[in-house]
Image (spheres, grey):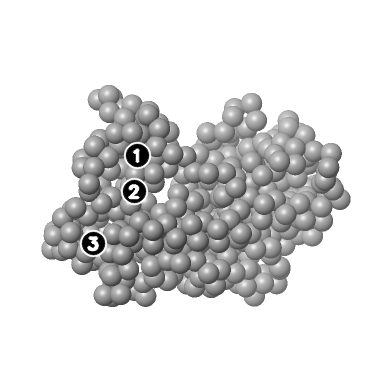
Amino acid sequence: MSLNIGFISTRFAGTDGVSLESAKWAEVLWLDKHVSHWYSGRSDRQPGMSLCIPEAYFGHPENVWINERIWGNTVRDRLVTNRIHELTNYLKSTLYHFVERFGIDLLIPENALTIPMHVPLAMAVTEFLSETKMPTIAHHHDFYWERTRFSINAAREFLDMAFPPFNTNIRHTVINQAAQEQLALRKGDGATLIPNVFDFDNPAPKIDEYIRDLRADIGLADDDIFILQPTRIVPRKGIEHAIKLVGKLNDPKCKLVISHEAGDEGLEYKTLIEELAKDENVDLRFISDRVSELRQYDADGRKIYTLWDLYPHADLVTYPSTYEGFGNALLEAIYFKLPVIINRYSIFIQDIEPKGFNLVLLDGFITNNVVNTVKRLLAEPEYRKDVTEHNFAVAQKFYSYEILRRSLRILITSLTGWTPDVK
């Protein structure tokens, strides 16, 4: 028997972690013939399978108005409370409509009950679950207590009630061990650890006709060393370490390419790394204007590429983050069989490093050993191949779709009594 699954979030669109991982979950659920439907404020999912409610988007003006008054303050005006409850009631009515329209059997809130970007949506989901006892798997990516911007607030009772809620019809899932431990400590509730995954049983895309001239298109020569930093330009990505590394390689053929833009945290950090690159004599390239979610042509007739179009051309990936909830870019690089330089952020140390990957490790600074290892990876194809093949095999063992499929089967069975068809 197949189930109708209802995913809920503020946004299912683009390349953020929630959008990417929810799509993978839906793909894995389809292996057992479960059909996924989507409820969100913004959506790039199939319209016939989705319900898009603008007020559910975290950037909707009403929600922005509420957020401006509950974060960074310790007192909440009565008007704010009333508008939170009004929006909650409206969104709850749309959830009832969503469930009825698509005949939903099980819900999967994607980070909607985790980080309080949209308090009324979380309240609506929580109340809906209390009123219906709908079987639910809550997929948590990053909790409010992991973000200092939510520390001072005028919404404590809402955080206690809905981020996440306690309900016997909910099974919680988290993406790292630290979150699992903190959820138990703070909420007294257990969670299943389900890391981010990739389809390691199918090979990564190769260079095709569309991307054959990508290197030249972004200004690189055939013999340049393409070092890819596949992240946004924000301080926690530690891009200064990548610049220091390239500077120590002391090779004019090395080009450090950053795929994404500065995002919503200002331009000061971008200016800082530009100045650092100049001081270190590093050829730094920003190509966010050539990278999008889909292949297309811009108004000037230039090709626009996806992030996955960059990996087949890259020689090396830098990932020197100081903090990550998990690390999708790490798995992407391993999936494309590229060597990776990574900073030992806390989640990596606790969850990923013990698995046995062969990565170039930083402890917050660039050592001569790191530089020499990178030079060897670039100069010795056989060594590079041994390293990347080993990492692919480890990732296939611990982070494949099959791992996700087993976990979801157990959770769905515990909630609904569903049993998989094991022909």
The residue mark sitting in front, 1 or 3, is 3
Q: Is residue 397 visible?
A: yes
Q: Is residue 89 visible?
A: no
Question: In the picture provided, is 308 more to the left or to the right than 157?
Answer: left
Ranked by sequence position, the earlier of labels 2 and 1 is: 1
Task: Give the quadrant of residue 296.
Answer: top left
Which residue does the image show at 35% across and 34% down from the upper left?
Answer: 211
Q: Amino acid at mark 1?
A: Val
Residue 246 is labelled as: 3
| Spot occupied by residue 156 in the image (x, y as percentages of width and height) | 57, 65
Task: Give the quadrant of residue 172.
Answer: bottom right
Question: Quick one: quadrant of the C terminus?
Answer: top right
Q: How far apart in space, not on screen, are marks 2 and 1 (Cα)?
A: 15 Å
Vertical comparison of 95 with 181: above or below: above
Residue to which mark 2 is pinned:
314
| Spot occupied by residue 294 in the image (x, y as percentages of width and height) | 43, 33
Disc 3 element? helix
The residue mark sitting in front, 2 or 1, is 2
Residue 291 is labelled as: 1
Q: How far apart in space, not on screen, are marks 3 and 2 (Cα)?
A: 14 Å
Ranked by sequence position, the earlier of labels 1 and 3 is: 3
Question: In the picture provided, is 166 more to the left or to the right than 194?
Answer: right
Q: Amino acid at mark 2?
A: Ala
Question: Quick one: quadrant of the N terminus?
Answer: top right
Which residue does the image show at 35% across and 39% down from the upper left?
Answer: 291
